[in-house]
Amino acid sequence: MTTRSLTHLQALESEAIHILREVAGQCSNPALLFSGGKDSLVLLRLAEKAFRPGRFPFPLMHIDTGHNYPEVIAFRDQRAAELGERLLVRTLDESIAKGRIVLRNPGESRNRHQSVTLLDAVDEFKFDCLIGGARRDEEKARAKERIFSFRDEFGQWDPKNQRPELWNLYNARIHPGEHLRAFPISNWTELDVWQYIAQEDLELPSIYFAHERDVVVLPGGALLPVTNLTPVPDGAVAVRMSVRFRTVGDISCTAPVPSEAGTLAAIVKETATTEITERGATRLDDQTSEASMEQRKKEGYF
Amino acid sequence: MTHTQLADHGLLRFITCGSVDDGKSTLIGRLLFDSKAILADALDALAVSSRKRGLEEVDLSLLTDGLSAEREQGITIDVAYRYFSTGTRKYILADAPGHEQYTRNMVTGASTADLAIVLIDARKGVLPQTRRHMTLAGLMGIRHVVVAINKMDLVGYDEAVFRRIQAEVAPLARKLEIPHLQYLPLSALKGDMVVERGGNLGWFGGPTLMELLEDVDLAAQDLDAPFRFPVQLVCRPRTGGLLDYRGYQGRIESGSVAPGDAVTILPSGVRTIVRRVEFFGEDLARGVVGQSVTLHLADDVDVSRGDLIAGSAGAPVPVRDLDATLCWFGERPLDPGSRLVLRHGTREVRAKVHAILGRFDLQSLESLPASELRMNDIATVSLRLQQPVAADPHGWVRSGGSFILVDEATHATVAAGLVLGQESY
Ligand SMILES: Nc1nc2c(ncn2[C@@H]2O[C@H](COP(=O)(O)OP(=O)(O)O)[C@@H](O)[C@H]2O)c(=O)[nH]1
């Protein structure tokens, strides 16, 4: 019997492939943002399905805050090499050295400073589109994000000045200096991502699976991983527990969750039944301000 | 793994329409909240048991809130997307605002929707907005419409009220020729007939909203439609063992395709045969609507991005004059002199609005004479194109009959277009 209709993962996959091919067809110099994290690993698999046996029609790019888990960086390099695709890395350390970024104190979170390095890289390489793995279910401000999201010449996102997206007809026209962000997995949820990773049996950095780690339980319940960047706060005590990361990013703002899930199947199950949204549980910086994501997006953050 | 044992009924996209205060946010909150429980149950392979209704404890505005600019204004001004899953089907809900000024948002949300829920407040009955929402759903080719008569708890769950409103909607629904129409009494607040039947609407024998969503047959119509494949990219690696590899990459927008099928390349009109339907290195016996694949053709024909590969039987005739219904989105009214680009599938051609044939009045459902096109207007127009486009008439199979207009100077998307009657081979 032949397929009559697509499973939900096939439908999402097909849509994402279509979007990637539209970026390739409409944009002259795109790049795919790749961090070694799960969402960008899904993007790479989708790009393989979109373009093989050809090469990717864009390089991979990572904006490295310098505060990443080393196993994730090693994984990033390994994966790019396996695929035989070009990986560009631009670091916040370079931006700091050039005086493009000024830290108020050396220990502060580098997360929101990424925008500077990112926009400098857009200028340097004259990229007209950056493909990212953001999803609309991640955060309220993202629920209205377009699949092709328009940024003005200052890299800014104006929620009131976005193009309506009809059917699957994307309008990627821009003026010189402007650029687009394209989000092929906009319509995926965290559960879809984990189900897809399980279905495709994708390899992931080890910190996505349950492991023993020293953490501090913060007053709101979030877990602070104990690292040399995030030492045990005065008066607090570290405890060792079984945790995993649901998202990996800058060390200073990514928190693990308690978990015993050591396999993809166990993670899928945990994700399906969890009541807390991904960012609510795992982002340390978003909790300060309701509208902080929207604010950062306006400034050019991914 | 438990989830692999569950049937996967794919992805359903739907839209909710209602006037302010009809209970849209409450209904969405109820669906998101109750489906979470279903999902947990489904994954535990437990029978769906009667669950405690806890919605009153959830702050609904937190579930459906959007951007801070809108929070300040206290209105929703754009389409927001919500996601939930029951374990057997995934749902994407386009939340389009009810404010009458924002036709464009509803048209945008409706363009990808398989189903529309039109909410009516049982106390108020059919409002002008109700007619507008139904009409837009019909115009945009949404095949499944659920007329949800909400707040039944406030009219004592009275069947007579439900029947009266149903009788009011029926003539309009007939006029719009919506193929699958259902009426449903519910209370979004109390939960009756949303996910659980509840005990108050015992006189109603139909399915709950959730049962209805779970049962929509998505494949039926698009699969039998003619094959349409806009070419996105040509893959020619020209390396190693791939010197002769030439694949056409794109997505099957309607129908299906198998090796041996006769196809026509448009607009050139060249005919050939499909040799392979490839997906990520594998050969498919048949590719179906929705799938992104790579096609290989029997002859070395000239095909590039912007071409349409169509099933040879009933392939559309390329034209340079096109009549269409437009929904105007531009901030400024249509300027007859402005340079527009029409995007149909992957094809872009220069276009001019040659004549405005009439403006469609969403209230009277009649076409009125018009000399201007303003934001949120719906009008029939004649377009003249610089290059030919092979378009299908927009009908209940939507692909092939839809396009957008882009302003060449500002790059803004200024209109959504639906092709009116066309010739085919
Ligand atoms: N009694 C009752 N009130 C409801 C029902 N659905 C919504 N409401 C109330 O109607 C008001 C408007 O609902 P809301 O969901 O915000 O409407 P929206 O403007 O369409 O999003 C709120 O006070 C809700 O609590 C219902 O089924 N029964």
Image (cartoon, grey):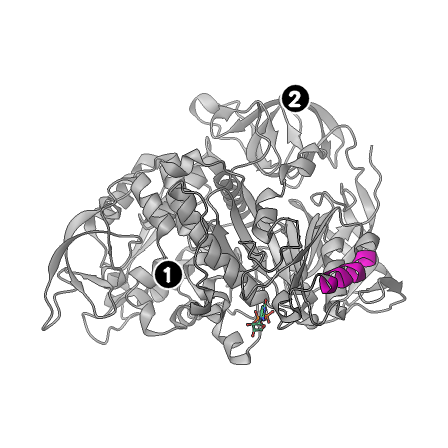
Give the CA separation, mark 2 to mark 1.
46 Å
Q: Which residues are magenta?
A: B160-172
Q: For residue A291, what is the image quadrant?
A: bottom left
Would you name the residue on which mark 1 appears?
Answer: A118
The crowding category of the residue bearing disc 1, from other C-alpha atoms within 10 Å (few below 14, some 14 to 19, many at least 20), is many
- Seen in the picture, residue A6 relative to A174 is either above or below; the reply is above
Magenta segment's dominant SS is helix
Name the foreground residue: B22 vs B116: B22
Residue A250's spot in the image, x, y percent?
A: 26, 59
Chain of the residue on which disc 2 is drawn = B
The residue depicted at 43 percent of the width and 50 percent of the height is A31
- Seen in the picture, residue B159 relative to B4 is either above or below; the reply is below
Name the foreground residue: A191 vs B31: B31
Name the foreground residue: B422 vs B174: B174
Is residue A50 inside the magenta stretch?
Answer: no
Residue B207's spot in the image, x, y percent?
A: 62, 48
- Whether discs 2 and 1 lie on one chain: the answer is no
> Could you tell me which quadrant the C terminus of chain B lies in?
top right
Residue A116's spot in the image, x, y percent?
A: 35, 66
- Seen in the picture, residue B259 relative to A126 is either above or below; the reply is above
Residue B158's spot in the image, x, y percent?
A: 69, 64
The crowding category of the residue bearing disc 2, from other C-alpha atoms within 10 Å (few below 14, some 14 to 19, many at least 20), is few
Q: Secondary structure at mark 1?
A: helix
Q: Ligand 1 falls in which quarter?
A: bottom right
Would you name the residue on which mark 2 appears?
Answer: B299
- The answer to whether the beta carbon of the residue marked 2 is less than 8 Å from any atom of ligand 1 is no
Left or right of B75, for residue A194:
left
Is residue B169 inside the magenta stretch?
Answer: yes
